[in-house]
Image (cartoon, rainbow, N blue to C red):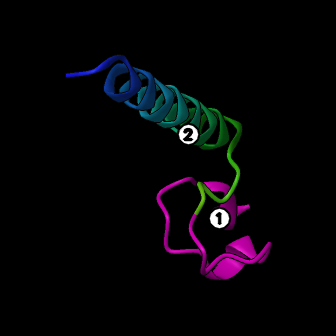
Amino acid sequence: MRALDYILLSVIALCAFFAFRTWRRALKNGDCCGHGGCNGDCAHCGAACGKHQK
């Protein structure tokens, strides 16, 4: 593998890390957990966040 391959792999890993961290933070805060069907209306959200019960 060349140096460019390692750079691309590290950029992809970094993006995956930040996406996972953002998802976990949303899950802990009771947000809609990134499901596209929520659209801010958590009463109809099918995610197991618990916020739609409030």
Residue 16 at x, y = what percent? 46, 36
Sequence-wise, the earlier of marks 2 and 1 is 2
Q: Which residue is drawn at 68% across and 46% down?
A: 30
Q: What residue type is labelled 2?
A: Ala
Circle 1 packing at 10 Å, graded few (<14), some (14-19), many (20+), is few
Left/right of residue 49 with respect to residue 48 in the rendered view: right
Q: Which residue is drawn at 50% across and 29% down?
A: 11
Compare residues 1 and 24 and report the one nearer the observer: 1
Measure the C-alpha gap from mark 2 to mark 1.
26 Å
Q: In which quarter of the image is residue 3?
A: top left
For the view shown, which residue lies furthest in the right direction?
A: 40
Residue 12 at x, y = what percent? 44, 35
- Report the magenta residues as a range: 35-54
* Image quarter in which the C terminus is found: bottom right
Residue 25 at x, y = what percent? 64, 33
Circle nearer the viewer, 2 or 1: 2
Residue 50 falls inside the magenta stretch: yes
Q: Residue at x 19, y 22 (%)?
A: 1
Residue 4 falls inside the magenta stretch: no
Dot 2 and dot 1 residues touching (CB under 8 Å): no
The chief SS type of the magenta part is: loop
Residue, disc 2: 19
Q: Which residue is drawn at 55% across and 53% down?
A: 49
Residue, disc 1: 53
Q: What residue type is labelled 1?
A: Gln
Compare residues 43 and 36 and report the one nearer the observer: 36
Residue 18 at x, y = what percent? 58, 30
Q: Quadrant of residue 10?
A: top left
Circle 2 packing at 10 Å, graded few (<14), some (14-19), many (20+), is few
